[in-house]
Image (cartoon, rainbow, N blue to C red):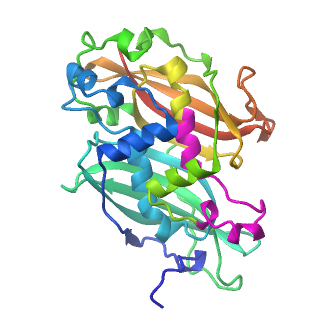
Amino acid sequence: MKTNPGRFFEDFRLGETIRHATPRTVTTGDVALYTALYGPRFAVQSSDAFAKAIGYPASPLDDLLTFHVVFGKTVPDISLNALANLGYAEGGFHRPVYPGETLSTVSEVIGLKESSNRQTGVVYVRSTGSDSSGRTVLSYCRWVLVRKRDPEAKIAEEHVPQLAKVVSPADLAGALPPLDPVAYDDALAGSPHRFGDYAVGEKIDHVDGMTVEEAEHQIATRLFQNTAKVHFDAVATRETKFGKRLIYGGHVISLARALSFNGLANAFAIGGINAGRHVAPLFAGDTVYAWSEVLETAELPGRSDVGALRLRTVAAKNQPCSGYPDRQGEGYDPSVILDLDYWAFIPR
């Protein structure tokens, strides 16, 4: 067989390392298309002049564009036959990425757990994205529900990894160059609110909403070279639980992050992902809203230019977030589609 049918759960082995095809050079064209798809407005990633004024050599890529490109490399080997991407942990953005850089990805299988129905299993991987010099730009863990080819196939070894609930922002602060907070122009950035203006427990309704169209979520997913069948094949998805294509979970993350600008305009860089859960699916025609809660504030050793906010951003579909839809007992409000816990850097 010369074609790739994708791996099924029984094809994975604990401890194996997977080197993913294909290296991808990111360009200003990718940046422009990403902006057209999601509308992020953070000044550092939008303007070379702004970025250079505060200490960057040029405007870096949006952190989530880097994430999606690195993630997309893993799909043909990890989640081509997935039913759902379940969650994230231990994510770290280790250095800025600039247009012209080439990214590649390697993953290690760190956990396997067969489902009780023996039809599926959960695969845990740690993926690392590197630049053309071999330097790590991004690392993260994720777990994904994958179909079995043969329900009777026996699994050689199972293990559920213990993952950190929170990454240390101090370990990630070195990803940013030394910045000049005096040169950081609040008016051009779109908000006067800096590190000291946010308090633990504060909730922010990001107000705006974005309706997702069928064409745009597929363009976005192709941009990242994500080949998961559930996002593209309308014939194959007729036989699934929902009977139609699912929108890539990362698309929801980027929409929520772009919406968060209204209230968090100066939280311009993502430092790390502590935890993430795709609570429910999103479909074309749905409208996404978001709200955020400040979970922690952290001063960073040796850095007087920036601090870190630990944020929990919740995205909901077809329901504005003025009421802060959230967990309900052991579940969630029916509108909630994403619950993301992450660190963001913000000038002091």
Q: What's the magenta region?
A: 229-256
**Magenta residue check for 296:** no
Q: Which residue is drawn at 62% across and 45% down?
A: 277
As drawn, the residue found furthest toward the front would be: 215
Q: Residue at x 29, y 14 (%)?
A: 184
Q: Quadrant of the C terminus?
A: top left
Q: Residue 33 at x, y = what percent?
A: 42, 43
Q: Which residue is drawn at 79% across and 41% down?
A: 330
| Residue 285 located left or right of residue 199 | right
Quarter of the image for residue 179 reads top left
As drawn, the residue found furthest toward the bottom would be: 1
Q: Residue 174 at x, y = what percent?
A: 26, 34
Quarter of the image for residue 128 reads bottom left
Q: Residue at x 37, y 47 (%)?
A: 30
**Magenta residue check for 239:** yes
Q: Is residue 72 above or below residue 187?
A: below
Q: Residue 67 at x, y = what percent?
A: 42, 48
Q: Residue 8 at x, y = what percent?
A: 58, 76
Residue 167 in view of the camera: no
Q: In this view, does 205 lie above or below 224?
A: above
Quarter of the image for residue 43 reads top left
- Front-most of residues 339 and 6: 6
- Front-most of residues 206 and 276: 206
Residue 122 in view of the camera: yes
Marks counted in the figure total: 0
Q: Is residue 348 above or below residue 231?
A: above
